[in-house]
Image (cartoon, helix red, strand yellow):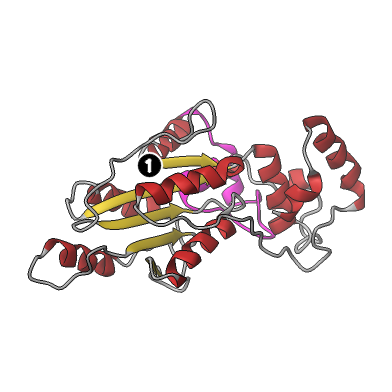
Amino acid sequence: RLGDRGRTQPMLPLANERSQVPLWFHRHVHKTGGTTVRGIMASLRKRGDAIVQRGLGSGSWSCKIDWGHVDEALERAHNASLPRPASPRALVFELHEACTGWVSQELPRITELRTLPSARVFLTTLVRSPFSHSLSAWMWDGKPSFGRFNRTIDYWLPYNMQSNQLLYGDFDRFMMGNKEPMGKRYRHFGEAEFNRTLDVVRRFDLVCTTEELAPCMERLLQELGLPFVRIGHAAPAHGRMGAGTLPADESKVVQEECTAKGLDCAAIVAE
C-alpha cells in the first residue's frame, strides 16, 4: 500500500534467501496496468531470476493455480537432502482469467502459505482512477470492437467494475458488459458487498494504484530479493473498429470531461 506521500511502505520483512522461495501472486484487474506487470515478469524470466507459472485450464494466465509446482518448490527448499540453488528462483503467477472461484478456492491457500518457513509470499493487485479506468475499459471491450452491440458507454459499462472483479473474479466482457444476467449482480453491489471486497483486499500485501505502478513494482522486487527491472509502460492493442478513437457523438463530451479533470484523454485511451 502507498503512504500519504506516495511512497510504498514495508509490508514483509526480508528473509533468508537461501531457505525461502519467493512467491509472487499478481491478481490482475483488467485495464489497470497488467500488460506492464506481465512485461516485468517476462524480464525476470529471461534473466533466469523467476519461473512464470502457467495456470491450470485453457488459459495460461488462469487463476487456477497449479499447486503441485508450488509444493515441489517449497519441498525442495525445506528438505536439506534435496539439491537446491543457493538463491531459489522466484515463482511468479499472473492471475488473470477463469477467476470466478479465486476468492473461495485460491486465496485461502495463498494465505496459508505465509505460515510456511520455506515460502516468502507476496500478493499484489492494481486499482485505477475510476474515470480513466472506465474510459480505457470502454475502448478495450465496449468500443470499438463491439460498437454495433454497445451503443454508449453508460449502456455497456459494468457498475463498480473493479470491485466486482476483485470480489466475484471477473465480469461479462465484450458485448455483454452491464447487460443481464450479470448486470443485476453488478447493480446490486451495496454496503455488504463493499465490506466483503475490503475483506478480500486486506489479504493483499501490496495494493497500488496504476498511477503509482513504477514505485510499487520497485518495492515489490526489493521485498522479494529480486534484481531491479526497468519498468516501462506497455499497453495492449485495442480492437479492430477504429482503435484509439472515440465515436464522434461521444468524443466532445469525453474531451470536455478530460479537460475539466486535467487528464490526457489520448493517453488514457491508449492504456
**Looking at this view, is 162 or 181 the one in front?**
162
Residue 63 in view = no
Q: Is residue 237 left or right of residue 18?
A: right
Residue 133 location, x and y as percent?
A: 66, 44
Determine which residue is flagged by label 1.
205
At horizontal 27% and vertical 64% (from top left) the residue drawn is 88
Point out the stretch of residues depicted in magenta: 163-191
* Residue at the image position 73 percent from the left and 63 percent from the top: 238
Can residue 9 be seen by looking at this rendering? yes
Q: Is residue 197 left or right of residue 186?
A: left
60 or 175, nearer to the observer: 60
**x and y percentages locating residue 104 in the rendered image:** 34, 50
The residue at the far left in this view is: 81
What residue do we see at 52% from left, 53% from top? 170
Q: Quadrant of the N terminus?
A: top left
The percent coordinates of residue 182 (x first, y second) are 57, 50
Whether the magenta-drawn stretch holds residue 91 is answered as: no
